[in-house]
Image (cartoon, grey):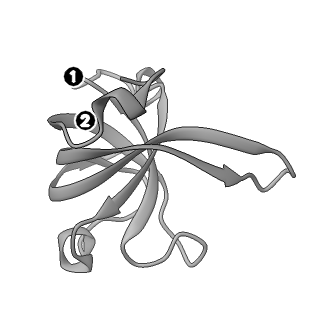
Amino acid sequence: MAKTPDKYIGRKFIVYGVVTQFDAATGDDQFRANTAASPQDYQFDYDVNTVVEAYDSAVAANVVEDDYVTMFISVDGSFSYDTQIGGNTTVPKFTAHMIDVTGSAG
């Protein structure tokens, strides 16, 4: 799914990850996370840069940067954004319907 997220639009999955950015730049209902299809032992093992938008801002109300999360998501497809160092990147984008914070990397 990481390489071709548009093929999975509308499909629902459980994904695991660590929140890498959740601040004023991302807003109160969208964040960046590194994700994987299964829980990982180490933060750096989550290797898919992903944009996650909460179905409702209340879904993400207790989430902060460095949280480990389990998310019940639907796939929105690919999403492109400008990076802080002046480049552009395209990543999978998910809508999170439920988010469970399972720990913290920080």
> Could you tell whether 94 is left or right of 88 in the image?
left
Q: Which tag, 1 or 2, sits closer to the chain's start?
A: 2
Q: Is residue 94 above or below residue 34?
A: below
Label 2 environment density (alpha carbons within 10 Å; few <14, some 14–19, many ≥20): many
Residue that mark 1 sits on = 38
Q: Nearer the viewer, residue 77 or 43?
A: 77
* Residue found at the very far right of the displayed protein: 86
Circles 1, 2 touching at the beta carbon (< 8 Å): yes
Q: Is residue 89 above or below residue 56?
A: above
Q: Nearer the viewer, residue 46 or 82?
A: 82
Q: Tag 2: residue type?
A: Tyr
Q: Residue at x 25, y 23 (%)?
A: 37
Q: What is the x, y in percent for residue 40?
A: 29, 22
Secondary element at image label 1: loop
> Could you tell whether 23 is left or right of 30 in the image?
right
Q: Is residue 76 above or below residue 63?
A: above
Q: What is the x, y in percent for residue 12?
A: 14, 39
Secondary element at image label 2: strand
Q: Tag 1: residue type?
A: Ser
Q: Is residue 4 above or below residue 10?
A: above
Q: Quadrant of the N terminus?
A: top left
Residue that mark 2 sits on = 16
Q: What is the x, y in percent for residue 104?
A: 31, 49
Q: Nearer the viewer, residue 60 or 11?
A: 11
The residues tagged by marks 1 and 2 sit, at their Cα atoms, a distance apart of 6 Å
Q: Residue at x 40, y 31 (%)?
A: 5
Q: What is the x, y in percent for residue 59?
A: 18, 70
Residue 99 sits in which quadrant?
bottom left
Label 1 environment density (alpha carbons within 10 Å; few <14, some 14–19, many ≥20): few
Q: Residue at x 35, y 62 (%)?
A: 53
